[in-house]
Image (tube, rainbow, N blue to C red):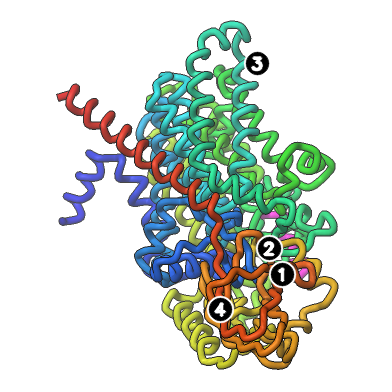
Amino acid sequence: MPFSTAFKFVKKNLWLLPLIAIAIAYIPLLVGFMSIKNDSCVVSYPIFYFFSSQLQHGIIPFWHFNMHFGFALLADPGTPFLNPLFWMFAFLGSTINIYVLYILLHLFIGGYGMFLLSKQLGFEIKTSSILSVAYIAGGYFVSHLQHANGIIESAYLPFAINFLYALFKKPTLKNAVWLGLFFYLITISGYPGFAIGMPYYIIILGVGYLVTHKFSLAFTQNKKAGLLFILSIIIAAILCVPFLYALFSNIENFQRGSIITDERYLHEGGTSPLIGLISLLFPLASVVQNSPFASSDISWNNIFIGLVPLIFLIAAIRLKQIRILLPHIFIVLFFLDISFEGQIKQLFFKLPLFNFLRYNGGLRIYAMLSMLIIAGTALHNYFTNSKNVLARLQTIIKTLLIIVVSVFLITLIVGIINHTLNINTADGLVKSILHIGFTPAILLQSGYVIIMLWLIKKFLYHQKRILFIALADIIFCFWINLPFTGLSIKSMPSIQQDIAASMQYIDDIKGYNILSKDVQQPAINHVVYAPALTSNHIGFIPLHAYPSGKKTYFSFVEKNGEAYFNHRGVCYLASDTSTALPYKINANNITIECNTQHTDTLYIHQNFDKNWTAETQNKSVEITSWQNTFMQIVLPANTQNVILKYNDSVANKLLILPIIGLIAIIVYLSTSYFKNNKENI
């Protein structure tokens, strides 16, 4: 299709614009020029790999034998065990390319969700396009591409808010079912922070609505919607029952990856209000490694939503419909406050459920969503030819230009005086750029912002040009920030080679001993942090290399140290502790070869769980706790081998609920869709 024809086609079908813009933004990942990194690569992908490899052998992976020597995988909130799309991609294959496709699909799903929400709020199509791209290619996503679970659940968030609005605008069973479905997907898709933040978002939105309307009238008008909202929660709860059962069955002995003894993670997860505000105009300055805000984890700082949305956000707050925006203003203030450092962060400790989270910064996506909704009100007025917003926009742009030009000049003078503008290219241009200092970052980006503000001011009366300036700005800033936070500068083929080399090294190890930290060390690189996670060997992994584990296990390691696991068998007999017994293991079974002439005790380095059973020669034998965390079995004389089976019969039965529930929802929504189409013909 010639370019001109394609352009005309997109012009007639503007709903394609955000999809094309998102695809352009993510070209580095789409073509494999860059790759996922950090947690997405060394934590989330190994979960996917294990899940997929077990499924492809016909095994539902309820137990992960390498999660700190065994943990119930369904109980791990870092595993999207019940997400249908996770299963679909896991069946397709266990390679990292498949996992990246899983992430990419959610990016487009999230873009469509934001587009849908914008339309629900009555915004015209150009506004919806800008907000969709600003959400999916904004500061939060560019930072959290290295946290895949956060990205997945962020993709579902606008859908939930969309159907929340839809339900209270048009209280129908269909809207209640859709809302319940997305409540479910947010809860089970891999990171509990989103599900924990959602009630706070809805409560603040509801309270804000009541404040801006007459209480009695609001309750009277929304009685039916309120009942259907409760139905949505019930639907989500039913679909989540297996996960909630597994989580609460393990909650007394559940612990996140590393032992938390102070407020370190809160300090790392939060950021100062100053750096948060700086990132709105200068996102690059908020993520450079040697910024003056080193106490904050750089991956949480960026809240850039684009210069055009930012300008219109400021304009919207001054519009006459400020009363309508109050609920979202309350949300922005609340979620930014709890994600910043300072005294206000104590709310993070005081409010229910927040103490379950390691980081507070991840909740900032709720603030950014409401910021875009606020900006959308002014963008909509602008694109529908409302002239009363233009004068305010001119004033805002001029004010920002004065601020940014002042920043540019001050930074230039300070940089020259302090000699902080030099770039050392001795280690190569790429490394020099990645190690750019705070001062040159501010200087470069303030120069860029001056140019962009000038373009916006110049073409303010040309709506189509403002549309493309907005999209280009978001995409460009997204690209600039990618190497600093979201993606690795290594290509996907290079990442694949590193993973394959590590896997091959581990697979070549013979014997039945625990893979100690030292044994795995030659296979560890910037991509593979815990090689045992992608193997059928049982091995020690660093305490923070996996999100979940048992308190008893962490207490054991704290008491005995990592050296305990050196040169020890995965399983052995009390009569011969130096001989590691041959074994085979998967997510359901452990088969151990042994030969006892007298009564003996079998020790197994897998965490004790009530759902493990054991038998030998078709006779059941009792499993008891050993060293307060592992398993031991007293074996009778002349035992030839032992078979252990993990079978959580309650979880098995409860899985029927989401399966039947999802089938029923699909049938209902499909029937409703075809019925509506038939009526419209």
Amino acid bearing label 4: Leu
Mark-to-mark CA distance, 3 and 2: 44 Å
Q: Secondary structure at mark 3?
A: helix
Residue 281, position in %: x, y? 61, 48
Mark-to-mark CA distance, 2 and 1: 9 Å
Q: Which residues are magenta?
A: 408-419
Is residue 609 among what the camera can see? yes
Q: Are marks 2 and 1 in contact (CB under 8 Å)?
A: yes
N-terminal of the pair, mark 2 or mark 4, is: 4
Look at mark 2 in the image and give the residue it sits on: 549
| Tag nearer the camera, 3 or 2 | 2
Look at mark 1 in the image and give the residue it sits on: 543
Is 296 situated left or right of 314 in this image? Answer: right
Amino acid bearing label 1: Leu
Q: Secondary structure at mark 2?
A: strand
N-terminal of the pair, mark 4 or mark 1, is: 4
The quadrant in which the C terminus is found is top left
Q: Residue at x 62, y 23 (%)?
A: 326
Q: Does the magenta segment cover residue 361?
A: no
Mark-to-mark CA distance, 2 and 4: 42 Å
Look at mark 3 in the image and give the residue it sits on: 211
Mark-to-mark CA distance, 3 and 1: 47 Å
> Of helix, strand and loop, which mostly describes the magenta segment?
helix
| Tag nearer the camera, 3 or 4 | 3
Is residue 381 among what the camera can see? no
Residue 41, position in %: x, y? 54, 69
Q: Secondary structure at mark 4?
A: helix
N-terminal of the pair, mark 3 or mark 1, is: 3
